[in-house]
């Protein structure tokens, strides 16, 4: 059963975003983000219901970024998990007594499943996986591109629990003409001219993958409203545009989905790198799907000042699209020499992999610490940023600056 805070989530949030919260919430919980990163400088930290201080990108719809300090660990806390919606207003309350997940279209037996049905009529399944916005780090593209100017915090890793999507489809009975499965949530655009956010997956992709879930728990708790309560789709290893939140309908289609969010949005150049020469346009595009290899330094913070001769603990995370991280390396001399670092617990191929290392600066001065990761296929990050006009799937070698005094 939902807690009162989830069932009666502030209605003003969906109607008018942060501004509508007015004196009740905003003044004591909104302050400028104090960061040396010029991309974040001046952005406010805000606190929405069920959330801690997050970096505000937009309020209508809510787009909230996780501060880098939370990426020194494998599991991102629910209250610090990033938020990304496409249309406004967003759902702010759900009554589980009346909520049903409808399954229809090209099926033998249409279903209307309550939360109790999901929890009692299907086998429970759990996967630890990274959700990352396709445009994470878009603000670092040069030349700049349109879209939300995220820094690096539009990502998070959680333990997701629910039921296998294929089990639900099998219970409904997939007809032989079904080719795709379309997901729709409770978020609806305010104007008819704005396309409703819906995404789809191939039927065969779902039936072959036991890790694709209808999740109703996140890190052992009910999903926060802004992360998909009461249930969301989880597609481990794929970018989060397919992870539809606040689920309401699953429809099996007898022809490929051709809505705006598939036909025009979330597409990359149709080549191996998903990139083109900066400032140019691709001749052909394909939908974005699998995550690229990425790694980050979360501790110490960028532009930190540390004393000479004292060991500094470096910590961060690495991940990829499901092959699993096999090695992480750091460099303090512009990539001329690399050193392997210690890896933390392996929580599965779709999860963040923690890493750590002690680094003792030999002399005073400014240092750039670089980090790169390798997955089990030998794939890594590029030395120079790859570019595409949508600002998707950045996976360059990342770095921070440390001042030794």
Image (cartoon, helix red, strand yellow):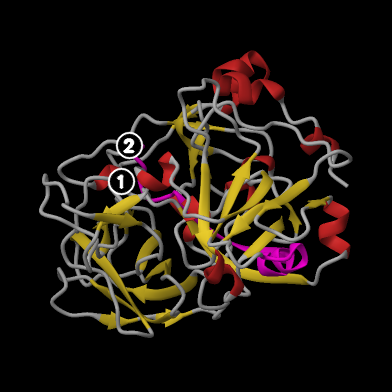
Residue 391 pos. (x, y %): 28, 47
Which quadrant of the view contains residue 107?
bottom right
Residue 343 pos. (x, y %): 46, 80
As drawn, is 210 to the left or to the right of 389? right
Which residue is most to the front?
177
Tell me, for residue 147, which label it has, or none.
2
**Residue 78 on the magenta span:** no
As drawn, is 291 to the left or to the right of 75? left
* Residue at image point 23% right, 39% down: 145
Q: Decide if residue 363 is in sight here.
A: yes
Secondary structure, mark 1, is helix
- Closer to the camera: disc 2 or disc 1? 2
Q: Nearer the viewer, residue 118 or 286?
A: 286
Q: Decide if residue 25 is in sight here.
A: no
Residue 62 pos. (x, y %): 52, 32
* Residue at image point 50% right, 69% down: 352
Residues drawn in magenta = 148-174
Q: Nearer the viewer, residue 387 or 219?
A: 387
Q: Is residue 50 above or below residue 342?
A: above
Residue 155 pos. (x, y %): 47, 54
Q: Are marks 2 and 1 in contact (CB under 8 Å)?
A: yes
Which residue position holds label 1? 138
Q: Nearer the viewer, residue 38 or 106?
A: 106
Instruction: Name the image quarter holding the C terminus.
Output: bottom left
């Amino acid at each position: 059963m939902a807690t009162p805070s989830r069932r009666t989530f502030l209605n003003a949030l969906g109607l008018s975003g942060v501004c509508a919260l007015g004196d009740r919430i905003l003044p004591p919980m909104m302050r400028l983000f104090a960061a040396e990163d010029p991309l974040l400088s001046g952005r406010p930290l805000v606190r929405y219901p069920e959330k801690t201080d997050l970096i505000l990108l937009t309020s209508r719809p809510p787009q909230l970024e996780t501060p880098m300090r939370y990426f020194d660990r494998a599991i991102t806390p629910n209250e610090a998990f990033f938020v990304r919606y496409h249309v406004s207003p967003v759902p702010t309350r759900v009554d589980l007594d009346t909520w049903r997940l409808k399954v229809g279209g090209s099926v033998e037996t249409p279903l209307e499943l309550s939360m109790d049905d999901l929890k009692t009529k299907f086998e429970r399944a759990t996967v630890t996986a990274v959700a990352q916005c396709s445009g994470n780090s878009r603000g670092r593209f040069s030349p700049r591109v349109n879209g939300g100017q995220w820094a690096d915090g539009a990502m998070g890793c959680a333990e997701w629990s629910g039921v296998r999507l294929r089990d639900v489809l099998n219970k409904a009975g997939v007809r032989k003409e079904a080719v795709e499965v379309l997901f729709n949530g409770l978020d609806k655009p305010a104007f008819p001219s704005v396309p409703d956010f819906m995404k789809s997956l191939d039927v065969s992709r779902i039936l072959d993958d036991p890790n694709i879930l209808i999740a109703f728990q996140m890190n052992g708790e009910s999903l926060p409203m802004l992360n998909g309560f009461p249930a969301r789709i989880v597609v481990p290893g794929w970018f989060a545009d397919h992870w539809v939140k606040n689920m309401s309908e699953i429809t099996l289609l007898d022809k490929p989905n051709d809505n705006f969010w598939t036909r025009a949005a979330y597409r990359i150049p149709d080549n191996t790198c998903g990139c083109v020469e900066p400032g140019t346009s691709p001749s052909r595009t394909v939908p974005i799907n699998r995550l690229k290899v990425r790694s980050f330094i979360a501790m110490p913070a960028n532009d930190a000042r540390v004393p000479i001769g004292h060991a500094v603990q470096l910590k961060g995370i690495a991940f990829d699209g499901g092959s699993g991280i096999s090695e992480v390396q750091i460099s303090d001399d512009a990539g001329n020499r690399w050193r392997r670092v210690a890896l933390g617990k392996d929580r599965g191929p779709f999860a963040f992999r923690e890493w750590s290392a002690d680094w003792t600066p030999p002399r005073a001065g400014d240092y750039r610490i670089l980090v790169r990761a390798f997955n089990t296929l030998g794939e890594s990050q590029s030395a120079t940023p790859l570019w595409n006009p949508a600002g998707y799937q950045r996976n360059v070698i990342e770095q921070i600056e440390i001042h030794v005094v």
